[in-house]
Image: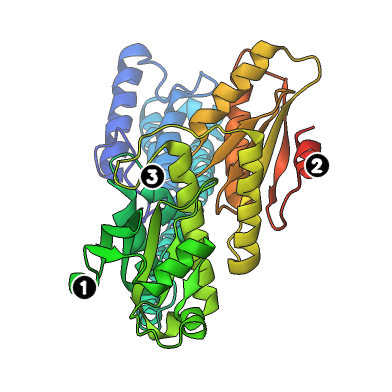
Amino acid sequence: MSSADSPVPRFSLGRPWLDALTVGIGLAVLNLIISRQDPGWLELNPSPWVLLPLVCGARYGFRWGFLSGAAASLGLLAILLITHREMVAAHPLFFLALPTVGLLAGEAHALFAGKLAERDDAVEVLTVQRDHLGADLEVAEDARFELQERLALLNADTASLDQQLRGLFEPGAGPVFPHLLRLLRDTAGVTDAALYQINGGTLTLQSLIGVADALPATLSLAETEIAHLAVTRQSLVTCRQVWSTVPAQSSPWLAALPWPIASGPARSLLLIHRMNFQAVNWRTFSRIQMICRWVAQFMELRGLDGTTEPTAGPLVVSPEILRRASNDAAAAHREHSLPSTTVHFRLASGSTQEQAARLGMLVAPQLRTTDLATQHPDGSVEVLLSFDGARDAERFHQRVLGLAARDALLQGRLLAEPGAETSTPSSPADTDRAAA
């Protein structure tokens, strides 16, 4: 960066020559007032006149440092030749010192100006890179939206299943069943379906999606062959199975699934009337069963019946319930490549019951609506992060460790194991070993 390109420094009058003139006049006045008999302060070492080329050189570079120093030297030389000629011979190097100091100050200015220029160049390069990355991000987002639209035409899964499942149980989300049917539409291609309540031999409509005319408000269980078979077997029944069992039937239903619950007969029934053609396969029916099984499990744990709104709060369950959920998670991973992860937190040996209770209170608020946790008798806590991979589990793991490090009761007491993806069903022995 040349001196001509140098920015105007602070406390400047705006022009180099004006600054030099101001400093020079100030020094001359002070010299006249303080030491009239010593023009140029030649008896001082160093002379205050050094300030003139020093200031100009440091501010504006070589040229102004040299010019101001040379001008001061020539001016003082002219004055001394008239008034004190003997002092010129006594101090010959003084008149060379002023322009030399200006050159040295200009060198310092050049060094600092070069560093500033490098910094400005780096900032400019980073700004350009940021703009390019922003443009690339916009292109990527446009491509993602276009890809989602094309996948939707092929009835592919475009929604995030884990987020939609959590959304079913968020406070204020409304009754679960209507949202569940929309979830089946988005992830399984179900276009017309209904959930019916089983009242003895009658099916009463609870919620529907699609054309209402094809989904009556009430049905006779005995006259709806596919529903009768599903309730009798307590399992999914498709139209193909009905045709093989009752060849003469002409039912319009594609599939029937009793609402899965942990114990006792189903109290509700999912009847599917229409689906996207490409979605009618065993893999899609398996996904529907998996989604309904998960939703039913969380409805049971939260005490919901499908028509009541969910409430907030963590789900801390017994080890047996967590083991059953882990087996379901393993099946979801095996059949649909949907990972879930378990994270274990345990206390160091010698921990008290108060510390164990504090650990449970620390972990519970960090749970989301579809996470499950249990506390074993030894005080360790096991968490099932539903539909979360190792990266999300690591974030959860670090968040809990950070909270424990700031807790006076748990500082230095909490040990944690990395999250393990649930890819195979866990046996009771496996769970006990993990907790230990």
**Quadrant of the image occupied by residue 354:** top right
Residue at x 50% of width, y 47% of height? 297
> Please, is residue 149 above or below residue 347 in the view?
below
* Residue 373 located left or right of residue 243: right
Query: Quarter of the image containing the C terminus?
Result: top right
Disc 3 marks a residue whose amino acid type is: Phe
> In this view of the protein, which residue sits in the foreground, 197 or 77?
197
Disc 1 marks a residue whose amino acid type is: Val
> In this view of the protein, which residue sits in the foreground, 48 or 237?
237
Q: Position of residue 403 (x, y in %)?
A: 57, 26
Residue at image mark 1: 211
Q: Which mark is residue 429?
A: 2
Q: Earlier in the sequence, mark 3 or mark 2?
A: 3
Q: Secondary structure at mark 2?
A: helix
Q: Position of residue 327 (x, y in %)?
A: 66, 52
> In this view of the protein, which residue sits in the foreground, 44 or 433?
433
**Mark 1 → mark 3, Cα distance in angstroms:** 26 Å
Mark 1 vs mark 3: give the one in front: 1
Instruction: Classify 10 Å Cα crowding around label 2: few (below 14), some (14-19), many (20 and above).
Output: few
Q: Secondary structure at mark 3?
A: loop
Disc 2 marks a residue whose amino acid type is: Ala
> In this view of the protein, which residue sits in the foreground, 345 or 16?
345
**Mark 2 → mark 1, Cα distance in angstroms:** 49 Å
